[in-house]
Image (cartoon, coloured by chain):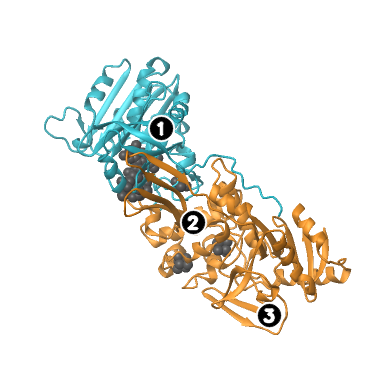
């Protein structure tokens, strides 16, 4: 019999590593944070990632879901994921206890353009719930405040109870050269931030220089309007980045679920420069 | 290397492949269709059979001829041999202490020789090789199966009415990607070897010189096969044209007939979508992580916890066609259609994908050849 080369040239990208839940924090009624450590110290030590990349988290017998990494690769030893409880897997993960084991594989995708942002003014816009990934980017930049120009942080929610971590926004307000704009569509008693319809709050964003980079997260319609608004203010379209989301089952560009126009979001995204996805953004069915 | 293999010696090809450790697989008639099955003797091939195909229609008929490959294609391409319709990716066991042990389940595969592969299906496999095999994440499941294959191609002499591989540039003759290719003539085959193992095998077969008469007959047969294909896509790259017509009324017209059944994607040799799931055994300790073919025509394909991206048939059909004929160009450097015609034949309501695409792109001149 002639020889057949069946040797594998790569580790199996589908196979998770075991990780332990070191700490569990309930952030709000539905949002919680998992602090994870790979049980194999070698895997843990060699696990490199960029802010904005994501992992596939596996809950035994239930399934795998894509979740952004919100820890700071240079400042935090544990892998941190902030998760909103919405369905089967995220409900299961909401009930894990400290010491429990999960499967983790990653990191996948391309994160936020933090290197490009150095030396520029930065506008960060997020709409609605589920923008934990953006909070991690803000933390990352504030830790390295001197590398960036002016900060503008915009958070838009529909209902006030979608707004989590108010103390962080209060803290960011104290950071030099930083403007924090928080608005809800409907206010409530004790709501000390703005009440404003749609994305009216964007009108308060002041763009001082063309050397401004924007990072946006939220529903697609929201991101498209926010981007157009910033372009109107003089931010170059190519300096506007946004985070997209689609059903994901493999995270390695094979299953086809996250295909979006000419790209697979799991590989080329989830963060894209606006011009790359503008043609299909907001068109039903893509 | 090119030699003539008389019909009487054809069995020797299978014998040698089997001697070399290959399981042989070939087209066989089963339940009214030609599908791949184990092959030991050449008489098991569809000798004398023809297929009649049109949108929504497939019928086999027996003629008086003695040829082995006088038909176009069946519902199966090579896809099921490399990209299994369902397979386990890994299993995990939770022990008494709660530790998880993950174990990959890469399939055991036997070296397999496929006899009678069509040019369109080789082109499709080449695309799936790019998709699963050579990008930054290699798929060990696909690659195992793929590397175990020895391919014996056959040029098409009798395309079906649904075939349009000549217009996509993928057929009717096989040009690359095989170990040995055969051109079937009345008294035997012109055999060309492409790989080293193909050449070794051919050298061992009792062949004769290819004569000018053989060449003339093969040339005439090829020209006739090309001429028989009247169906063609409006251009090799319809991307710009499709995306310029996302609001064309034809989308609604075709969606009005489409059942969103996904037959077209199941038979398409280039479609790769699959879904992943987990099954836990009753004791709750052992769980398997598996994948199975999925389709962009299914509701779950674009499901997200907050909304379904494609909740209507029209959006699914548009997604399928604009990807297959459009953005495949960005992702794989060419269209995702190799002109095999299966999605026309096996559509239960007989939707003609080529006609639909041409109507949408119709006559506006931006469909580059
Ligand atoms: C790149 C990326 C990063 C993400 N980061 C976070 C994060 O940091 N925190 C967070 O809370 N959520 C995040 N999500 C969303 C999260 O993946 C979904 O909420 C989760 O998959 C829902 O799974 P479920 O089983 O609980 O819900 P179900 O509604 O039961 O969903 C069933 C299955 O559908 C798929 N699915 C459903 N919704 C989504 C979705 N929005 N995105 C992708 N697949 C989906 C999954 O395969 C899921 O298992 C992210 C999504 C993507 C694509
Ligand atoms: S789109 Fe249709 S004709 Fe083209 S390769 Fe797929 S099944 Fe064949
Ligand atoms: S085009 Fe035909 S085969 Fe494809 S989903 Fe619609 S009805 Fe089914
Ligand atoms: S998640 Fe499977 S292709 Fe992107």
**Do labels 2 and 1 touch, CB within 8 Å?**
no
Q: Residue at x 46, y 45 (%)?
A: B103
- The image quadrant of residue A57 is top left
Q: Residue B48, which numbered label?
A: 3
Identify the residue shown where x is 87% and y is 72%: B213
Secondary structure under badge 1?
loop
- Residue B55's place in the image compared with A21, above or below, is below
Nearest-to-viewer mark from 3 and 1: 3
Q: The chain shown in orange is which? A: B
2 vs 1, front mark = 1
Q: Residue furthest left?
A: A189
Checking the image for residue B245, the label placed there is 2
Q: Quadrant of residue B156?
A: bottom right
Residue toward you, A177 or B102? B102
**Which chain does the residue under circle 3 lie in?**
B
Q: Residue at x 70, y 63 (%)?
A: B18
Q: Which residue is mark 1?
A: A52
Subunit under mark 1? A
**Number of other residues with Cα within 10 Å of mark 2, as a class: few under 14, some 14 to 19, many 20 or more:** some
Task: Name the mark on residue B250.
Answer: none
Q: CA distance from mark 2 to mark 1?
A: 35 Å
Decide: is B325 above or below B263. above
How many residues crowd around disc 1 within 10 Å: few (fewer than 14), some, or many (20 or more)?
A: many
Q: Residue furthest bottom?
A: B64
């Amino acid at each position: 019999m002639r020889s057949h080369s069946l040797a594998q040239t790569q580790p199996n990208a589908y196979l998770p590593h075991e990780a332990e839940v070191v700490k569990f924090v309930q952030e709000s009624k539905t949002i919680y944070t998992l602090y994870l450590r790979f049980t194999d110290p070698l895997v843990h030590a060699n696990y490199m990632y960029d802010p904005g990349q994501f992992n596939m988290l596996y809950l035994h017998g239930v399934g795998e879901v894509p979740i952004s990494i919100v820890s700071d690769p240079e400042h935090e030893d544990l892998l941190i994921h902030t998760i909103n409880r919405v369905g089967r897997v995220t409900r299961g993960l909401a009930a894990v206890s400290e010491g429990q084991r999960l499967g983790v594989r990653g990191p996948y995708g391309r994160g936020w353009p933090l290197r490009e942002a150095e030396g520029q003014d930065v506008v960060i816009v997020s709409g609605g719930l589920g923008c934990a990934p953006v909070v991690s980017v803000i933390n990352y930049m504030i830790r390295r405040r001197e590398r960036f120009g002016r900060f503008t942080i915009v958070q838009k929610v529909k209902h006030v109870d979608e707004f989590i971590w108010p103390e962080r926004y209060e803290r960011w307000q104290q950071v030099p050269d930083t403007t924090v704009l928080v608005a809800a569509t409907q206010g409530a008693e004790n709501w000390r931030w703005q009440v404003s319809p749609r994305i009216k709050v964007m009108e308060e964003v002041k763009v001082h220089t063309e050397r401004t980079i924007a990072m946006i997260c939220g529903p697609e319609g929201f991101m498209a309007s926010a981007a157009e608004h910033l372009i109107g203010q003089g931010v170059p379209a190519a300096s506007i980045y946004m985070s997209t989301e689609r059903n994901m089952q493999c995270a390695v560009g094979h299953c086809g679920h996250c295909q979006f126009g000419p790209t697979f979001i799991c590989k080329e995204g989830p963060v894209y420069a606006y011009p790359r996805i503008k043609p299909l953004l907001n068109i039903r069915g893509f | 290397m090119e030699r003539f293999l008389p019909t009487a010696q054809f069995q020797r090809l299978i014998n040698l492949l089997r001697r070399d450790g290959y399981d042989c697989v070939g087209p066989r008639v089963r339940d009214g269709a030609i599908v791949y099955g184990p092959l030991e003797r050449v008489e098991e091939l569809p000798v004398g059979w023809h297929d009649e195909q049109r949108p929504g229609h497939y019928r086999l008929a027996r003629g008086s001829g003695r040829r082995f490959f006088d038909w176009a294609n069946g519902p199966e391409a090579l896809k099921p041999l490399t990209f299994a319709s369902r397979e386990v990716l890994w299993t995990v066991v939770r022990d008494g202490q709660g530790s998880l042990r993950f174990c990959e389940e890469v399939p055991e595969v036997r070296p397999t020789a496929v006899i009678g592969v069509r040019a369109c299906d080789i082109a499709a496999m080449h695309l799936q090789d790019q998709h699963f095999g050579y990008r930054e994440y290699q798929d060990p499941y696909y690659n195992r199966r793929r590397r175990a294959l020895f391919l014996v191609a056959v040029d098409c002499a009798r395309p079906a009415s649904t075939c349009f591989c000549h217009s996509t540039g993928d057929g009717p003759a096989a040009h690359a990607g095989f170990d040995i290719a055969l051109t079937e003539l009345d008294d035997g085959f012109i055999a060309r070897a492409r790989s080293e193992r193909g050449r070794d095998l051919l050298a061992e077969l009792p062949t004769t010189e290819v004569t000018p008469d053989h060449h003339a007959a093969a040339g005439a047969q090829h020209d006739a096969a090309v001429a028989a294909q009247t169906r063609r896509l409006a251009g090799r790259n319809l991307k710009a044209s499709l995306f310029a017509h996302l609001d064309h009324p034809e989308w609604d017209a075709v969606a009005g007939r489409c059942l969103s059944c996904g037959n077209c994607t199941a038979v398409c040799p280039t479609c790769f979508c699959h879904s992943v799931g987990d099954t836990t055994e009753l004791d709750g300790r052992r769980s398997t992580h598996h994948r199975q073919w999925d389709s962009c025509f299914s509701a779950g394909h674009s499901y997200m916890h907050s909304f379904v991206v494609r909740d209507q048939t029209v959006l699914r059909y548009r997604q399928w066609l604009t990807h297959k004929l459009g953005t495949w160009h960005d992702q794989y450097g060419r269209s995702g259609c190799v002109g095999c015609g299966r999605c026309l034949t096996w559509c239960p309501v007989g939707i003609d994908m080529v006609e639909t695409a041409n109507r949408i792109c119709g006559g506006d001149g931006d469909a580059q050849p």
